[in-house]
Amino acid sequence: MLRGFYTAAAGMIAQQRRQEMLSNNIANTNTPGYKADQSTLRTFPSMLLERIDSNGKTPLTSAGQKQGGQLVTGVYMQEAIPNFVQGDLQESGVNTDLALVQGSVPIDKKTGKPGSLFYMVETADGGTRYTRNGHFSVDANNELVTTDGYYVLDIKGKHITVSDENFTVSGDGAILDQGRSAGTLGIALITNPMDLVKEGNGLFSPQGNQQPEAAAGNPQVAYQVKQGFVERSNVDAEQSMTEMMEAYRSFEANQKVLQAYDRSMEKAANEVGKIG
């Protein structure tokens, strides 16, 4: 009976976390470059039930009836993993908006899937992070920054300084400011984007020993930077709403099971052992 409590409660917790993930996706439908989270539900490790003889020992014979079968005690939601599919492009007409259009990239040998391209930015602590959000602007020091004030880096890892917002960017990311070169956008190739950790504000950081590679000059990498465009979020709002309704119904079903167990326990405690 108590096992039923835990199983139903585990289902409720898993669906609640799934709803939170989907709600966050929907909230970022209009966030440029946002990558939707996705996850799967898995069962807890199963237990093998075996019949014990009258002496309190588990029979060691190979007879099939000695084993009672498998028992699963609940479900949990695995970590949320971003979907790195390219989002649609939207023309903004803003000169500082730069959409990164990914072409061909190498296939990662470990996963069998293609890598992903990202802009390199510098955070307040001086660390390098990676983003697909190309909704940039020029700050008071004439440096190219993200909407959250992170510095956009060039291929040498330096800040990009321009005279004003009237600069031009070529397809390969080269910046021309009033007839002079202002550097080239730092675009990194992450061979296995599944190893990236989402930090919020559209930023990702690599984990483990993965070292991002420079996309510029790599013959296996093809990309284009489109000025005056932004990459939209790849969230499918309709699909996310449908999945939210499914998660809610599943949560409600587990809740009813939990309530049924609670009523059974109440009856067992108050009526079954009652002396007439």
Image (spheres, grey):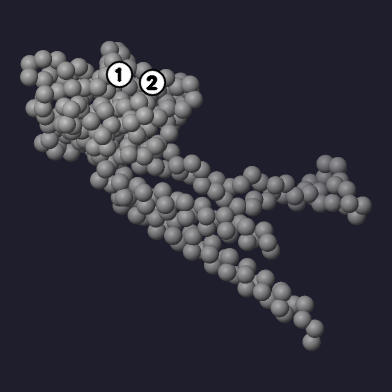
Rendered location of residue 217, percent (x, y): 27, 12
Q: Secondary structure at mark 2?
A: loop
Rendered location of residue 232, percent (x, y): 24, 39
Does 71 sit left or right of 111 as displayed? right
Distance between mark 2 and mark 1 Cα atoms: 13 Å
Does 77 sit left or right of 229 as displayed? right
Rendered location of residue 5, percent (x, y): 63, 61
Residue type at the position of mark 1 = Gly
Picture residue at 45% right of the left edge, 61% below the top: 249
Say whether disc 2 or disc 1 marks the residue closer to the N-terminus.
1
Picture residue at 83% right of the left edge, 41% below the top: 62
> Which residue was labeled with disc 2?
212
Q: Which mark is residue 72?
A: none
> Which residue was labeled with disc 1?
157
Say which of 105 and 118 sits in front.
118
Q: Quadrant of the N terminus?
A: bottom right
Image position of 146 with respect to 7: above or below? above
